[in-house]
Amino acid sequence: MRVAIQKTIGVVGAGFSGAVIAHTLAEAGYRVAVVEGRSHVAGNCHSVRDGETGVLTHVYGPHIFHTSNQKVWDYIRQFAHFRPYTNRVKAIYQGRVYSLPINLLTINSFFGKIFSPAEAQAFIAALGDATITAPQSFEAQALRFLGRDLYEAFFKGYTLKQWGLSPAELPASILKRLPVRFNYDDNYYASTYQGLPEQGYTAIVEKMLDHPHITLHLNTPFEPHHAKSYHHVFYSGCLDAWFGFDEGRLGYRTLDFQVERHAGDYQGNAVINYCDASTPWTRISEHKHFAPWETHEKTLIYKEFSRSCGESDIPYYPIRLLNDKALLGRYVARARAEKGVSFIGRLGTYRYLDMHVTIGEALETAVQFLAAEATGNPLPAFTVDPLGSA
Ligand SMILES: Cc1cc2nc3c(=O)[nH]c(=O)nc-3n(C[C@H](O)[C@H](O)[C@H](O)COP(=O)(O)OP(=O)(O)OC[C@H]3O[C@@H](n4cnc5c(N)ncnc54)[C@H](O)[C@@H]3O)c2cc1C
């Protein structure tokens, strides 16, 4: 049953976090003002059709929807038709092409063998460095599991480029499980559902926000002092920005994309990783392969470069090393003392979140808000713990 509640909720950011909350609360009868600093909705999932090639382009880098969460899968498909899609990534190292994640084809091609699954398993186990009993770093963990050759081919150079740090400086927790499959399964994601929205992600968010109770304000940077105009604010901007960065900046990596247009098919696959440290880009995405049901004579590629995030750059990947976590702890303590605002999404909680996690958390946050309203209690600053193990 819908109720007419004359209270305006402020939602900062029109990415999936903000859009899901805005839609859910609008459906529950609230007026919602969505305030977005950019000129478009959908946050980093924004997709547009390129004028020159006609290719549907993932503007902030390639996004593949995958989930094992039935509720999220059912929810998102209210707003779009998804086409089945399987992400199969290739890797180039020292002039040869391999299959990722490391699987039986990768092992057999790399070592020039025709191992069965059991033979490959025994072979890799023997390559692992058994003298490393309590690996502390990502490098030690990889050497323990895989041995030096596979580690150097598929992790060392790529990680250095992606994070600007040697794997020896990164925690072992990054490589939680043995990153190897002893079969020919090259489906990048082990999720129950995987697909891409036929019309792109921006069309989904536009549909979510197309509601009589929602007003959308694009090109409108929100500042904390605006919060007093709203009954409650859901803030999906950077946590440290809310406090004017006065404790310091949380560390992020940013990405630069070199966009090129070519005739025909550039690389024959959506994503190819470049694992040599001497190649400056980390990967090349060819966006028309994210829509294999479409036909385009021309093609558009993104060469992706990773670097440290400066003050005017877009924050992409939270680094979350020990010093960032200490700083995060200070901001979280201050955020918990704020009234009338909840910090949400990848930037508000300083975590890497896939889209399905973002959507699941936003749905849950909206449910908790409605429950809190029903009992007259305020919603806390966080509905998930940003200091948890993301
Ligand atoms: C390179 C890359 C590739 C990815 N690939 C995948 C993938 O393949 N599959 C997958 O599931 N997920 C992927 N993700 C994750 C996905 O991008 C996130 O799950 C999603 O963007 C999170 O949504 P959000 O709303 O929390 O944040 P965002 O999308 O970042 O949205 C936040 C919005 O808030 C706005 N904003 C911030 N501060 C303010 C302010 N003060 N005033 C007004 N507006 C403000 C921003 O402009 C932005 O539009 C990828 C992420 C990256 C970085």
Image: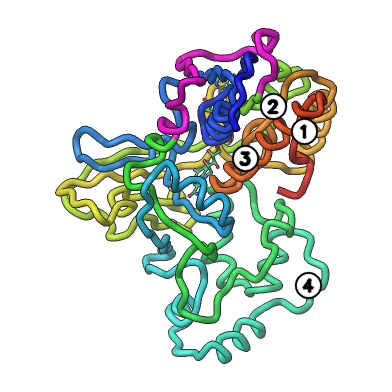
Which of the labelled discs sits on residue 109, or is there none? none
| Location of residue 347 by image quarter | top right
Callout in the foreground (3, 1): 3
Q: Secondary structure at mark 4?
A: loop
Q: Are marks 1 and 2 in contact (CB under 8 Å)?
A: yes
Bounds of the magenta span? 205-233
Amino acid at pointer 2: Leu
Nearest the viewer among 183 and 246 is 183
Amino acid at pointer 4: Ile
Query: Measured from the top left, where is residue 123 in percent x and y?
Result: 60, 86
Return the residue at label 4. Answer: 132
Could you give the CA–CA distance between mark 3 and mark 1, rounded to whole angstroms? Answer: 24 Å
Instruction: Please report the residue visible at 41 percent of the width from the left and 55 percent of the height from the top.
Output: 195
Q: Is mark 3 within 8 Å of ligand 1?
A: no
Q: Is mark 4 within 8 Å of ligand 1?
A: no
Which of the labelled discs sits on residue 239, or is there none? 2
Q: Residue furthest front?
A: 1
Is 280 placed left or right of 172 in the picture?
Answer: left
Instruction: Please report the residue visible at 70 percent of the width from the left and 9 percent of the height from the top.
Output: 228
Instruction: Please report the residue visible at 70 percent of the width from the left and 31 percent of the height from the top.
Output: 370
Q: Secondary structure at mark 1?
A: helix
